[in-house]
C-alpha cells in the first residue's frame, strides 16, 4: 500500500490473517462450541479505525505538501525570471 507505514500495514494484515484463521477453525470445530473472543474481534475493529484515521491524516499532509510545493515553485519561478531579466539588462 502506497503511503502507509509498512510496519503498521504489516501488523494490520497479520491480525486480519490471525482472525480469519480463528473463524475458519471455529467453523471446523463443531464439537467445541467456544465462541470467538469478542475482545479480539473488537481489537481488529480498533486497528482498522486507527488505520483509517492515519490514512486520512496522511492524505491531508500530502495535500498540504502539494499546495506548499506548488506555491513555492511559483515563487521560485518568478524570482528566477527576475534574475534572468536583470542579467540580460544589467
Image: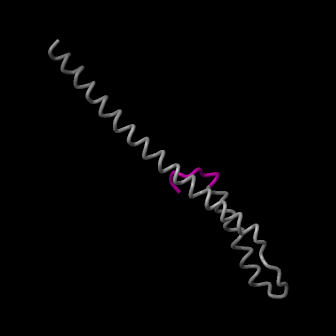
Q: Nearer the viewer, residue 53 or 77?
A: 53
**Residue 36 vertical placement versus 27 (above, below):** above
Q: Position of residue 71 (x, y in %)?
A: 34, 36
Q: Residue at x 64, y 51 (%)?
A: 7
Q: Position of residue 67 (x, y in %)?
A: 38, 41
Q: Which residue is at the far right?
A: 32
Q: Which residue is at the far top?
A: 90
**Residue 2 colored in magenta in the image:** yes
Q: Residue at x 76, y 79 (%)?
A: 25
**Residue 56 colored in magenta in the image:** no
Horizontal relation, residue 68 to residue 14: left or right: left
Horizontal relation, residue 34 to residue 4: left or right: right
Q: Quadrant of the C terminus?
A: top left
Q: Position of residue 80 (x, y in %)?
A: 26, 25
Q: Residue at x 76, y 84 (%)?
A: 28
Region in magenta:
1-8
Magenta region, main secondary structure: loop
Amino acid at each position: 500500500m502506497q503511503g502507509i507505514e509498512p510496519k503498521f500495514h504489516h501488523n494490520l494484515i497479520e491480525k486480519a490473517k490471525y482472525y480469519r484463521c480463528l473463524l475458519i477453525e471455529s467453523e471446523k470445530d463443531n464439537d467445541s462450541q467456544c465462541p470467538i473472543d469478542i475482545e479480539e474481534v473488537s481489537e481488529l475493529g480498533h486497528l482498522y479505525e486507527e488505520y483509517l484515521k492515519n490514512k486520512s491524516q496522511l492524505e491531508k499532509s500530502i495535500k498540504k505538501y502539494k499546495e506548499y510545493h506548488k506555491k513555492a515553485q511559483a515563487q521560485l519561478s518568478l524570482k528566477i525570471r527576475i534574475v534572468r531579466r536583470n542579467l540580460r539588462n544589467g
